[in-house]
Structures are given as structure tokens and as C-alpha cells.
Image (cartoon, coloured by chain):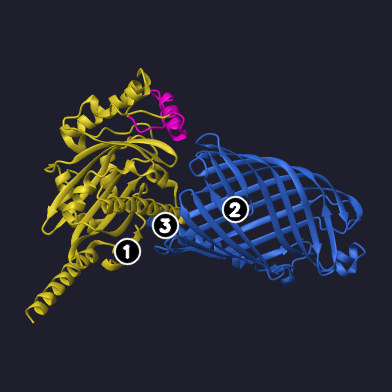
Amino acid sequence: MTMRFSLIVLVLLVGTSFAASNPLLLSQELDATYCYEGSATTMAGDRHVGSLTEHYADLKYVVSPQVGQKLLWRFGAEWQRFSFGVPDGVSLPKTLQQISAIIGCDYQLADQWLLRVEVQPGVYSDFEQVNWHSVDVPVIVGAAYLHNADLQWFFGVLMDPRCEYPLLPSVGVRWKFADQWTLNLQMPTPRLEYEATDNLKVYLGLGIKVGTFVVNNHFGTDHGLPQLNGATVDYYEARFGPGVSWKVLPNVTLEMEGGFVLGRWWDFYDARLQFASRQAPYVQIACHARF
Amino acid sequence: MRWLTIYLVLCVAAWGEELAAVSVLKRFSDVATADTQRLLVGDIPSARGGLMDFRNGISAQLCFAVVATPEETARRLQDWDPSRHEELKVYAFHILHNPCSPEDFAALKLNLKQRPMKWLLDKTQATTERKSDLNLTRREARELGGATSFGDGWAKLLLERAAAFQRSGIAAAAPYEFGNESVLPAGQLRAVLAEQPRIVQEFEPILKGSGLVGKNASLTPVEYWSLFEADHHATLNLGAAYRLTVGDHYQLLDLEYYVSGDYYTSASLYEIWPVRAGNTTVSLVWRGDFFAAPVLSFTKGTERIAYGVLMIQEIKKEIRCFQADMKKGQ
């Protein structure tokens, strides 16, 4: 943890001197999200185990020094937390949490191709007990093909050696097909967007969350299922709903959305135990700043 | 034997012409290669400009070939009408008389069924002396608000700006007074060019001749106004295209001294050399584009790289349309 903190401080110091030479050489991204998901019936197979709610928070900061005409480094950190209101006796973790560093780069591969490689080493667990077993290193590789100002294609793959499916590929497109309409099918938030004004967009879309975490070494024993001690759990979540995106400043956007969680899934795939949560309402606010 | 000698002399001369052009290119250009054979089959090598200290600025450089003599290419570039190409989304393009008169702007009409045009109308109607999203002086904003019709208001504004330009050159271009600070189009262009010392040195004759560098403009440009779509918004502009013969080649400067919105100004510089292709002389063209836009001061990192990539795509589209017109002899 200390080492990661030192790395971030070092990057910020380097960044400050970069910014002093030319402020455009250093870009920063700050994204903050909070979401509340209402009570949803939860099943273990065909067995009803109760209802649960969820608080979700995510905070991500990335600093990108440009080190050449085609290359930008990406350094940063992310904290992501799922807090579940789990009824007593249900063998689901109350918290799944990620604290990770972000190390990567953006590179212009060819005239119209941009590449992003991002490694997120960190702790991915229920944070009841943190040890080396909680450390994971997922890798995201993405490429964008910029056809023109109105059409761009995206290709990506999430590589997580701990996940049951260690390679999750995705294809996306951003197509501004009319003056006010954009089909923005980029993972993990594919959307149909309508520009109501220069600063206000409304959208309808999906939100998909995927993560792999490790529960503590006595989690199973505490819940009467010893096979879940230190088990790995893949978590998936899909939501659908409308939202508004308001550009309060040229570089700051606020988003608010609500709708329905289509489902949540916890897969202790080693122990062949799965939980699924049914539909529930949700509200979310988010802030995205680029400076 | 004599024919062989003549043939060899011609080959060496042609090779020498190309070599001279390429060596000049290397002196100031960032475009890596300019292989005439590849250019003649449609290749358009390009280079994104580097980051500038001037936050509003962005640039790009490209090379292309035109199957016509440099004189013909330069002459056609100077008054080329892009409105014939639907994909360029230029709704109207008109050459101005000198001195200009209201008749020069008689064709200014908006088709309000098109969303980008409606956007310009909405922004015009929302303009007051205190607030506007358009590039205007406060006096222009007041007069535009009080105009009897959209077309009349804009025609009067463009006529006044064009007349001022014809009297006193780019130095007379009135500022845009509704941003965080008053912005002079000439000042923005000079700031962008100030970061391109090699290019400014190469194009010193035409930059001085236009009055963009120095104080005394000696060249007479072809002036025009146009109505086009920029970022899905209808945009009006006033521009001037200068042409200068420099030894065996030509220089062109096409600058916008007024833009109604979305960005502040732009300039395109061209240098056109003769090169031999078989038995004919064709044109090797270097083009540099320099933009100043307020949105760029907030555009950094990968987003700025993407902006540069897309800018090059748009310029390539325009070049291909010009090449097609030259091929058809239009």
C-alpha cells in the first residue's frame, strides 16, 4: 500500500513539472459514481434466500503524461465498492471491494488506430481479511478505429486470470447517425443518446459491471459452507434505464440515471454455487472531470 | 544514341525536380514521405502537429499529388468551390467582388428543415447584447437581434466585416467579444503560426504578402463567404485565398478572417512543386492546416490525439474531392 502511494506521489510530482513546461502535456481524469439499488429477491438456485439492497461507489483518478507524439502513460488508482444488505444466514459477502493501481498507456498505432493497455494490480476481496490471495492483476486491452468524426469502432478484451472466463472480449461502436442522435455502444455502458441542447444529453442504456473477488478464509465456515473458505466469486450486474448527462463546465459532466437492475449474479464457480438477484429499481449519480 | 542521351537527360531532370521538391519538403515538413508514385495513386501521407503551448491551437500536415501543372493546381485551389460535393456539407460558397456589395450576400438563405441550420437560427435568436454563443462583437449582437430577418441580419454583418477586410486587411477583423476574453481572429492565427518557425520561414513571402506577418499586405486575394456544417452546426465564414509564385513553385494561403461559431479561425498553407510523371508535369502539394478553437483548451491527452486524427480524416476527404474535380476538369 505504501509503495503504491509513493508511486502515485512520484507520478504527481513528475506530472507537475511536465505541466509547468506545457499544461497540455499532462491530462487528468477523475470519475466518481454512487448508486443505490433497491430490495431484490435473491435466489440460490431455485431456493429463495431473502431480499437484498446494494450501495455501490466508485472513485477513479488517472493522470496521463504525454511522453511523445504518439504515446501517453496512464497512472492512477481506483476504489470500487459493492455493499450488499445481505439477510442473516445467506452465504453472500456483505462487501466486495477493489483498491487498485492503474498502470498503462495509450498509443497511436496507425493513422486511425488508437490502442490502450491498462493493468490494474490491486486487492480484490471482501476486505474481511487481506492477504496475497486477495491480490489480482486484471489487464484491459482496447483498440479504437476512428473512421470519421461520426463513426468509431472499439474492440477490447478484459483478461483476468482469476475469473472463470479469463478472457472477456467486447466490440463497440459510437455512431452519430443523426444531428442529435448517437448510438454509443461502448462497454460497459452502451447507450442511445439524444442531445437535447449543447450541454444536455438524455440517454437510455445498459450498465454492466463485472468483477472477480476473493472472500476471506473463514467466510465458508461462518456460513456453514466450508468449501467457500477463501473462495473466488465472479460478480456480474446488468442495469437498464434512462439518464441525463449535463455538461456543467466544458470539462465537467454530471450524470443522473434511474431504472431497473435486470439482475445480479454471484458465481462461486469452484464450489459450483450460484446466487442470482432479480429485478430492482436503482438510482445513480456520477461526475466525470477531465483537466 | 542521341535519343537515348535526351531520354537520360530528361530522366535525370525529372528525378532532379522531384529530389529538389522532396529536399525542400524535408526542410520544414513533418510528413515522413512524399513518394510521387504513391501520391499519384491516391496516397495522402499525413502528420498530426505536435502539442502547442498555445492551448487553442491544433495543426496537421499532408502531402498529395494533382494531375495538373502547378500553375493550374494553384489557380484552381485559390477559388475552388467545395459546395458541389455533398459529403463536404458546404451549403453555399460565393466569391466576393471588390468592393463587395449587398448583392454578394443575396444568396444567403437557411433551410430550416435541416437541423444544423435550425441550430444557427436558434443561436441567432437567443443572441442579445449581453449574451451570445456566437463569434460577435457586442454591437453586432445588438444589430443581429434587431434585424428584420435572419438572412438580412447576417448579410449585413458579413458585408461590414468583408468591407472592413477589403479596406484594411486582416488587422481590421473585429474581435469576438462573448467568450471569457475578447478574441481577435488574426491574433489566434498568429499565435498558432508562432509555434511553427520552420513553416513560417518557408512561407514568409506569402505570409508577409497577406499581412498576416508584418504590416503591409501586397497581395490581392480571392475573397469568399460560405455556409457549411461544422460539428453538426451551420457555420458562416469569410475567407481570403492568396497565391504567390516563388521561383519554380507556388505558395497559397487560405485563411478565415471570420467564423460565426464553434471555432475561431483557421488557415491552410499550400506549397506546390512541379514533378514529372512520365511525359507530363504534375503537382506535388504540401498542405498545412492550422486551427484555433476554444474547445481545444479543454481537450487533452488521448482525446486531443483523436481530435487530430479526425481533423486529418476531414482534410483528406476535402483533398480527394479536389483531386476528383481536377481529374474531371471541373
Amino acid on which the number 1 mark rests in the picture: Val
* Dot placed on the residue nearer the N-terminal end, 3 or 2: 3
| Magenta region, residue range | B112-136
Q: Secondary structure at mark 3?
A: helix
Q: Do the residues marked 3 and 1 share a common chain?
A: no
- Among the chains, which one is blue? A
> Residue A186 shows which numbered tag?
2
Q: Which residue is pictured at 32% across the width and 64% down the height?
A: B41
Say which chain tag 1 marks.
Answer: B
Q: Which residue is pictured at 47% across the width and 56% down the height?
A: A146
**Amino acid type of the residue tagged 2 in the rendering:** Gln
Residue wearing tag 3: A25
Q: Mark 1 and mark 2: span between their CA atoms?
A: 36 Å
- Name the residue tied to disc 1: B41
Q: Residue B75 placed where, x, y %?
A: 18, 48
Residue sitting at x 76%, y 45%: A37
Q: Nearer the viewer, mark 3 or mark 1?
A: 1
Chain of the residue where label 2 is placed in the rendered structure: A
Dot 1 crowding, Cα within 10 Å, few <14, some 14–19, many 20+: few
Would residue A189 be visible to someone looking at this image? Answer: yes
Is B122 one of the magenta-colored residues?
yes
The label nearer to you, 1 versus 2, is 1
Q: Residue A281 versus residue A134: which sits nearer the camera? A: A281
